Image (tube, helix red, strand yellow):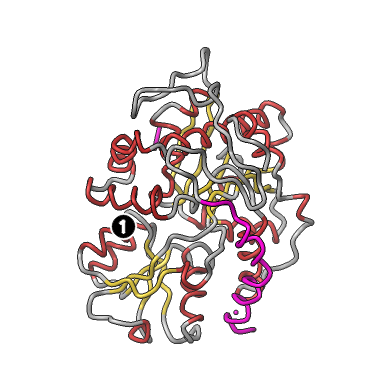
Amino acid sequence: MVRLGRSLGSVVLGVALGLAVLSACAAPAAAPGAAPPPAAGGAPAAASPETAPALPPGAAVPPKPGPLRRIELGVVALAAYFYPMWIGVDKGFYAQQGLNVELTTLQTNEAVAALVSGSLDILHCPTDSCITALSKGAQIRMVNDYTSQAPYDLIARPELTSIADLRGKKVGVSSLSAGTGSLAKVMLRAQGFGPDDYQLVQAGGNPARYTALQSGGIDAALLSDPVNFTAMQDGYRVLLSFSDVVPLYSFVSHWVTNSWLEDPANREALVSFQAGQINAQRWAHDPANKDAVIDVLVRYARTTPTIAERIYEFYMVRHPGLVDVSDLREGPVQAVISILRDMEGLGPLPPEDQWLDRSFIQRARQLAGLQPS
């Protein structure tokens, strides 16, 4: 059910140099119909007949017999890189694991508070927001890397033809100090902008930011799909993409609280949740399911078939490894930490073994029929 003291150039160069081996060794994009690519250095993924049975193209999978365990999953805003979660719900891959996953949409600023308060079981969180909360004492744990890039474009009104035209202008973001707000600061600093050269405006989620751009309330906005494709179709200009500035970056990831993990039943549910998501993404990457994937995108992203086709092409064909729910990699996370320390004065973090936990995704890989990474 869906209900930067140092120059940014030095930061990006440092991250790039420190992660060059990870980038170079990253597994190739998944072939059509294959499982999502493993992490850098991981063994090739192997599909399992038990977890990925042959089905008619586009068909849903049968649920696990018996009552389903309810999971409250929080998501921030609306973007089509949610597609593994949407397919997990719509095509029964969570139910196949015995789960009834309900998606709750939140704003960036309230997401971590909702997780810590116990309102959510799992949070699909902007990684920088959760790492910042971790530095302030939040007892939370990262359990899935989810993305290795931030698929966001800086899109402006048609009369603004270059980044230089943004001086003195308003740039719409979801939060002034996290999520797309951090992305905008990084992108503009890389282009020589100081903090007083433009105005960040908190303008809501992805669709709300585009509405503000259309109305003239802001001059540019950080937009992801499906809205960025709609904006381009409507004549708005892409001035810069975040991946052109920082190519390896954990934008969103999955987090839980330490207290939630104290219950053995919750730990098993987390493994099942991740296994269902892995199988959902595997299903999405099978070309035989293309029409059904586009249908899911139309309904859940609330967009047109034309835009859904462009989204499919972007994620399944051109960038099949951008979203990978099957592992937790250190490199993209370290890029986030480096930028936060330089630009936001990130405080000390606990030792990584206290908050970066790969054990659940490794068990989920086995349950989904993938080799250990």
Q: Tell me if residue 17 comes above or below residue 138 in the rendering.
A: below
**Which residue was labeled with disc 1?**
227
Count of marks, rendered view: 1
Which residue corresponds to the image point at 51% horizontal and 38% vertical from the top-left?
35
> Which residue is rendered at x = 56% and y = 39% of the image?
120
User: What's under tag 1, amino acid-wise?
Assistant: Val
Residue 75 percent across, percent down from the top left: 47, 46
- Judged from this view, the residue extending furthest toward the left is 234
- Label 1 secondary element: helix
Task: Left or right? Give the position of 366 relative to 35.
Answer: right
Question: The N terminus is located in which quarter?
Answer: top left
Other residues around mark 1 within 10 Å, as few (<14) / some (14–19) / many (≥20): many
Query: Which quadrant does the C terminus fall into?
Result: top right
Between residues 83 and 279, which one lies in front from this camera angle?
A: 279
Q: Is residue 173 left or right of residue 136?
A: left
Q: Main secondary structure of the magenta part?
A: helix
What is the magenta range? Answer: 1-28
Say whether residue 232 is visible.
yes
Q: In the rendered view, does 156 fall on the left or right side of 116?
A: left
Closer to us: 117 or 155: 155
Q: Is residue 16 magenta?
A: yes
**313 over 190 or under it: above or below:** above
| Res. 98 in view | no
Please state the horizontal and vertical placement of residue 308, each as a whole percent of the image: 28, 47
Observer-nearest of 366 and 195: 366
Name the spot of residue 34 as percent of width and height, x first. 48, 38
Query: Dividing the picture into quarters, in which one does residue 357 lie?
Result: top right
For image coordinates 50% across by 62% down, the residue present is 179
